[in-house]
Amino acid sequence: MPSLLVILPLLAVLLLNLPLNFLRRLAQPAALLFAVYQALFALQVLPAGCTGCPTHERWFVNVLDPLTSVLLLAIAIVMFAAVCVLRATASDEKHGFNALNLMLLAVAGMNGLVMVRDLFSLYIFLEIASVSSFLLIAAQRDMGGLEGAFKYLVMSALATMMMLASIGLLLAYSGSTKFMVVAEALHAHGSHGYLLTAIGLFLGGLLIKSGVVPFHGWLPDAYAAAPAAASTLLAGIVTKCTGVYTLIRLVQDVFGPAVATQQLLLIFGALSVVVGALAALGQSDLKRLLAYSSISQVGYILLGLGVCGSANKFAAQLGVAGAVFHLFNHAIFKTLLFVNAAAVEKQTGTRDMNRLGGLAQKMPITGLTSLLAMFATAGVPPLAGFWSKLLIIAALWLAGLHGYAVLGIAASLLTLAYFLSMQRRVFFGLLRPEFAHVREAGWALTVPSLLLAAILVGVGLALPWLIGSFLLPVKGF
Amino acid sequence: MTKLMYFAILLPAVISLLALGTRKLGRVCGATALLGAVVNLVVALKLFMAPETAVHIPWTSWGLDFTLRLYSFSGFIVLAAAGFALAVTLYSLPFMAKRAHSGLFYFQLLLSVAFANGAALADNLILLLFFWEGLLITIYGMIAIGRPGAWKSALKALVLVGASDVIMMFGIGLTGHYAGTLTISKMHLALTHAGPTLAFLCLVIGATAKAGALPFHSWIPDAAVDAPLPFMALMPAAFEKLLGIYFLARVTLDIFVLTPASWCSTLLMTLGAVTILVAVMMALVQTDYKRLLAYCAISQVGYMLLGIGTAVPVGIIGGLFHMINHALYKTGLFLSAGAVEHRSGTTELNKLGGLARQMPVTFFCFLVAACSGAGIPPFAGFFSKELIYDGALERNGVFYAAALLGSFLTVASFLKLGHSAFFGKVSEANKGVKEAPWAMLLPMLAIAGFCIYFGLFNTVPLHKLIQPVLGAHRLEGHDFAGWPHSIGLVVGTLVVLALAALHHFFGVKRSGSGSGAADHVRGAPGLRQAYDAAGQGWFDPYVIGMKFARAIGAVTWGVDRTINWISDGFAVGVVAMSSYLVRAVHTGSLSIYIWWALAGLVLVIVFLVKVN
């Protein structure tokens, strides 16, 4: 029953907070167990898609289509990694327990978010996920964390206002917040200025949530300031769910692939790809570099989504498939990189790349998996990231958007450039004397690293099976 | 019989590895090599006796199959190669005994035998190419182990032969495309359209370059000086001619149908005539025993090309007969050069002289081989050249005249060589020179014997070896064995021989020494400048190619630096500048970020409303 994915974490939070000490010790195993359950559930429904799955349940509308299943799987994987990171990095038991509760709440929010088909329910779950994230970022209570959380909070509030206003307008016009009803209303009277403003407001809110240039100001500070486990969850999946997934879902199901929407997505996507990569090139803080890299990669997803309204139906299908695939891949490799950043920070005490170097000798697993993640992000075959970028660029080319396709390829070089620079400054080169006694991080960080790296390689190699079974059916024409 | 074909390829290869393994053991290694050569000869003899057979193993798709075919021609080539290999191996035992890398030499010698057998037996163009390229490696290796600095000559050989092989590869690709198969015996292409003609020309270039014709010849004289001498006797004198002319014959007879009417035939004949004349002119003025022989070897390829290029039966038979004769006498001549080098320590003609008395057997062998090469009756070379003259005359008198002129110069250069090495005064340094050891004399005597035997009893080689290649229907009932049919041709040849002798005596009288017999040619107005230019490498395709390559290199270096600047200087600068600007606007101020977001929102709404 899909609703369990929302109910179980909420129930867990309630149970764990009963005044019974032994329950607290069960918290992390229970969270890991839940992640495994969710992953298995997602894998089980993934090939079937929405056929044979319940579409309506008692409390809220939820549907399992391939897009939702992919997101559920990604949430489960990232949650697993984040809980492992939490175990390795939590400063004390109380802090760790609090963070775990917040994570469970965030996961409940995201699971609900990807399953609902109603604008207002979507808004509720989106806020559950966001508010849990603010608290996660601020949990460390140092200046950086508070500043990052504050920026995220203010910008999110802006986004919330926009989206709520938009929902109000749409409700007033169509009389419902259900996707189907709103979509029909928009289809009938789409060019009405009033409705266009509503769409624009919603898009603006989602672009803030996704961290797309120029709506991205909060993102680098929030990612860099958050504690390791929080940044893993935040960068890995929260932004993807609250921003990018919702954007894909609404553009596909509600707003419809209008020409104007498509052009906006392409423009902001291209801007993000380039500005994110250029900004990443000059960073010296490892996590800040990863944050700008996220902005750049989200730009690719937007480019793929921007083909959705193309007259070339195959290109449109390919573009959306590429966007969703890249969303999944990005969740995996960005999580992996944040896990590795956590490992580096934990073992050396710094994230300043100017002070690091040669760590691959001392931390071979971290060094190797980070290399794999970097190649996957830059799009080196046969890793997963190559195929998703290829789909996006092929779709752009087929749709006649040659300039954007070339830009996508050129920006791959920038991606490779900043990641190579990162890899060289952190893992290669000479080992500094003060790090002579650094050792590989413990299992709680290496196991998720290896798992995520294996997924990157496995998904890349298994592409021929994946492309027909769930990538292309994502957008069912 | 199929097993025997495998043996012919595998046994020499396996024994070559044994030789490699025992290379530190001196005599054991030599004995192993001798054993390998003997075994190979036995296998080759059995193959030669065996009936026509083929083996076909599907290998990969695209027509690339492991196909071997034994028939009269390939059996003949394998047998001849085995004979030469044995002679040279036996000869090398004393010659290489005191030299460095003798083990490596035997290893590569046997490996070359394996490759040569494979190339002769292969019935698939790609398979043939595999063995063909294998020989390129052993050519490089065998030259490189010569005297110090020989790697330069080895590199030159590698580049020139490699370049011709690349052209041949292209030709193989084209041929396969037009024929629809890569199996040689199934090919039968007419030279009527441009595509097949281009393929034909590429294959011809590959074959003739292997045989040592112009313009891929210039590594041979260099190698003659630098490589160990048995290499010269084995490869450029015997194997390369056998395989090159063998493949040329297959190309012109089997794969394509060369007719006298085709301009390709004229082209081949012209190439042959030019090769004859240019190379022999160079031979005439050489002052080193081995270099002279090397140029002469190039020149003789011209006769084979001319003969096969005539595309009439008498010319083809003459060309093929000349191939085996030339392999015999040129190997014999190189071996005599080795004997002289072995005893006197030099091959420079100025320092030699009067060796006929000290080394009578060597001199005898030289004399027989030289007579055969000069085309003096009744030695073997006379008969093959007469056949070629006959074929050339049937096509055009010009080619006949060129061939005769070539003969004149060949005789002149042999006279100069023999005179300066074996007659005249013995130099101080050579006072104590003795006859070569028996292991060197034996192969030379055997070869000299064959030079006489193939002449006096030319029915045997022509009936048993050469004429079956064309087959009865293409011979049109002719039999070319026995004394030449045309008395006129014989008279012409004899006149030329006499003239050459007169020319030699004139030259000797003019310069006062045997080695200076051609000095008047060297110093003739017009020719002197040409020789000087040749001496500086102006006509050497390798030198020209290297100059060209260096020029290209300079240009591409400039282009490379420019691109490098664009990518490493300019582009990096632009990216770094942009990166700096992007970072500069990210001040961390929340209010600025909020303004950005609001501006973006306005943009979104305005855009949506405007576009709709």
Image (tube, rainbow, N blue to C red):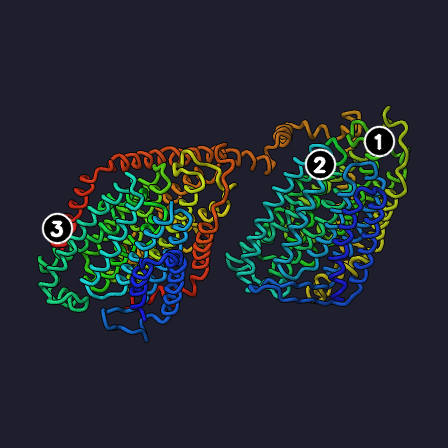
Q: CA distance from mark 1 to mark 2?
A: 22 Å
Residue closest to the eye, A206 or B391: A206
First in residue order: circle 3 vs circle 2 = 2
Q: Quarter holding the C terminus of chain B?
A: bottom left
Amino acid at the residue labelled 1: Ser
* Tag nearer the camera, 1 or 2: 1
Residue A56 in the image: x percent, y percent? 25, 73
Q: Which mark is residue B137?
A: none
**Discs 3, 1 touching: Cβ within 8 Å:** no
- What's the chain of the residue with tag 1? B
Residue at numbered disc 3: B606
Q: Is residue B266 left or right of residue A262?
A: right
- Establish if B419 lies above or below A277: above
**What is the residue that sits farthest to the bottom in this orientation?**
A52
Q: Residue B65 location in percent, x, y?
A: 62, 63
Q: Are marks 1 and 2 on the same chain?
A: yes
Is A333 drawn above or below residue B149 in the view shown? below
| Contact? badges 1 and 2 (CB < 8 Å) | no
Inter-mark Cα distance, 3 to 2: 89 Å
Amino acid type, label 2: Ala
Horizontal and vertical percent position of residue A204: 18, 52
Q: Residue at x 25, y 41 (%)?
A: A147
**Dot 1 corresponds to which residue?**
B344
Query: Could you tell me which secondary element the residue under label 2 belongs to?
Result: helix
Other-residue count near label 1 (Cα within 10 Å), few / some / many at <14 / 14–19 / ≥20: some
User: Mark 3 is on which residue type?
Assistant: Val
**On the image, numbered disc 2 is attached to which residue?**
B283
Chain letter for the residue marked with disc 3 in the picture: B
Task: Give the CA distance from mark 3 to mark 1.
Answer: 100 Å
Q: Secondary structure at mark 1?
A: helix
Q: Nearer the viewer, residue A44 or B88?
A: A44
